[in-house]
Image (tube, rainbow, N blue to C red):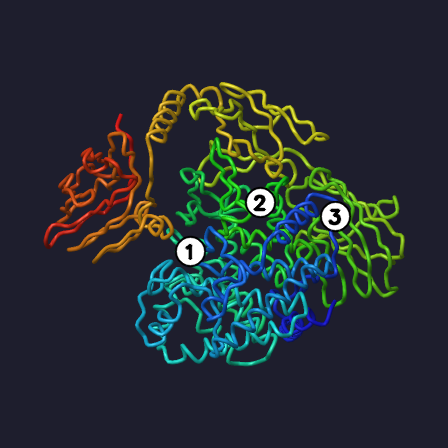
Amino acid sequence: MTLSMKRIYFIPFLFLLFACQQQASSPSNDRLVLTPVDIQDVRLLDGPYQHAMIKDGQWLQALEPDRLLHRYRLYAGLEPKGEIYGGWESRGISGHSLGHYISACAMMYAATGEAVYKERVDYITSELQECQEAMATGYIGAIPGQDSVWLQVAAGDIRSQGFDLNGLWVPWYTQHKLLAGLVDAYAFAGNDAALSVARKFSDWIDTTFDGLTEEQFQEMLTCEFGGMNDILAKLYQITGDEKYLKLARRFYHQSVLDPLANQTDQLSGQHANTQIPKIVGAAKLYELKGDTKDSTIAAYFLRTVLNDHSYANGGNSEHEHFGAPRQLEHRLSESTSETCNTYNMIKLTQHVNTWEFDGQWGDYIEKALINHILASQNPETGMVCYFVPLDAGGEKTYSDPFDSFWCCVGSGWENHAKYGGLIYYEAPDQSVVIDQYIASALTLDHIRLTQKSDYPESALVRIEIKDVDEAFQSLYLRIPAWSRGHQVTLNGKPISGLLTNGYLKLDEKWAAGDEIALSLAMDLHAEELLGSDKKIAMFYGPTLLAGALPQGMEPHNYPVFLADNEGYDWIDWDAAKMSGKTQVGYPQDVVMMPFYQLYEQPYVVYLDRYNEEDWANHKEKVEAERRAQEILDTRTMDVLRIGEMQPERDHELVGENTESGEAFNRKWRHATDGWFAFQMTVDPQASNELMVTYWGGDAGNREFQVLADGQIIATQKLERNRPDEFYDEVYELPRNVTQGKQKVSIRFESLPGKTAGGVYGVRMLRAQ
């Protein structure tokens, strides 16, 4: 363990040990307290994780730091040394990628020891020092319009909503990434100057916004702010400076965290990854100060998301948002499972496991690593996914190496650099916990060992002890809940241990050369989609399976599977090949294989399973719905998911006296004595139709005009038109409105004293 990493983990370890000693009479504190083993004490060995890390490293080395620094230098009044990258780096969120890049390079240095990564961390840090000195306030940033907006906010002029703070796109989110990168540069790459830059920047935050009232600060927090509470808590941990703790506490978002503290699920309709980092911050604060309100927030949120809002791959959210709990049947699309969410859920889960020492948390991390994180990377190019689609016919869309720079690009760089920090834990008595079965070598002062395995494709894990202190006693192995049993041998002879909370404790007199073999019992098993007994995801052991579909298959031909609910002999499974063909598919069968290995090919993850009688009753309806959706998708040129932050921003939504909300598990927007407008793509060579979704039960003074580029195309009145159901109205756009144009402005404007909407969905269609 290097000095820098001792500095960052030392305080919570002592705090938790002290807390455990002080409260030993409480049953909740009888469990062992754990500390994750540092990345630099682990080296990955041959296997899918090492391959993913190598591909990630190739990408990191191909990027040019000066291009990521472009706007940092420009806005500091210095000459940029490289042309700005495209994608999100050329937009209002520029600068976020640099923070992730520093973190990924610092972690990669810790994970490999390769000097090229430290050189990049050191170079970027020196450049940021120069920018900070040029700005002369402690501030550094790359956000267009930042100076004037921070002045407005500091003065109490705050106009905040989901992704927008006084016209800036999530500025605190971006600055959190930068601060996190600087702290990681200090922690993983030993760069003391990075800590100095981070402190000066945080001092600027403290001084600049100290005058805001609590009400004003909470209004500011309405705009996504990443994990500002988390990173400020880490600065307090490193420095011991109480002002950073106080500032971390100010980034407590009451409207989101108070319900969680009261163990109430109000997540439906919330932007998922806006919330998860806040909860990670609460977990960190609990570790530092021991306030059980913080641990309640973290543990309740974690259990709620995993049990009530998650998919089979360990991911969550559809179109970036949580929905109603345990109702995912109609939330399968091309935009399920944002990868940033799982990046943060793994962080949170690791925090909670250090307090609870429960195998269910290692089980989740395993599921998420194999079936989302590995699955999100193209194994040939190293490119990553924003979303990992789980709908039938889904296909992964990967980033461009130099022209995407989405949020999930930055977190993706980190995902594949930090595997080493997720494999092992240490207990206060120096026991070692093997939590993830990833081929690797562990080097600690009191033990050196290697894991070698083809896991998850093989159920056998071999652990060889290379060197060990005589006093070393306990080794813990996680026994996954999916395993039907297990066997352990030491040097070829069976041994037993105590199985508690999903961990098998082995107490032996260990010696160099000892070899432990763990055999788990893998088999086929299914997981139902939350809210549906007809859709199942198949697993072999921990590995999610998917059926490969041919390119160009039309949706009405996606197979269903005619099987009873008992057993899975309808898949001709070959464990040695990790694949098997279904035997009961209609109209055709598919070959099932590990989801993480599928790329550049459409697939089906959730299988529609019916018995013969059910299918006879549902066949006509299912096929009609599929064909109708297929026709609608073919006609659709543009879709606005109304009420959702990023889609509205992408469609340049503006308005007056307008608000959004959620009802009947769908987002809406309306305007009372006001209007809202947005841009929609059209076909200048065709007749275009605007399809608008309304709730048929809406009534009460809802009368408005619908305009296209200023021309009235409809006057609409909502007065319980179709009670208790959603329905669509289709408005024809005059050809003179769309001719020669790629986009038009669609405007909903209330009649005087009335309300426009609610609008629940908008599509632009080619006329039939």
The residue tagged 3 is 439
Is residue 106 among the parts visible in the rendering?
yes
The residue tagged 2 is 383
Q: Residue furthest left?
A: 752
The quarter in which the C terminus is drawn is: top left
Residue shown at the point (37%, 72%) measured from the top left: 217
Amino acid type, residue under disc 3 in the picture: Ala
- Which of 339 and 764 lies nearest the eye of the viewer? 764
Q: Does residue 430 appear to the left or right of 554 in the view shown? A: right
**Which mark sits nearer the N-terminus, 2 or 1?**
1
Rendered image: mark on residue 91: 1
Q: Does residue 148 appear to the left or right of 242 in the view shown? A: left
Distance of label 2 from label 1 (alpha carbons): 21 Å
> In the displayed structure, would residue 602 be above or below residue 19?
above
Question: Residue 329 placed where, x, y %?
Answer: 43, 38
Question: Residue 726 placed where, x, y %?
Answer: 26, 38
Distance of label 1 from label 3 (alpha carbons): 40 Å
- Which of 135 and 539 lies nearest the eye of the viewer? 135
Amino acid type, residue under disc 2 in the picture: Met
Q: Nearer the viewer, mark 2 or mark 3?
A: 2
Is residue 727 among the parts visible in the rendering?
no
Q: Residues within 10 Å of mark 3 (few under 14, many from 20)?
A: many
Amino acid type, residue under disc 1 in the picture: Arg
Describe the element under mark 3 as helix, strand or loop: loop
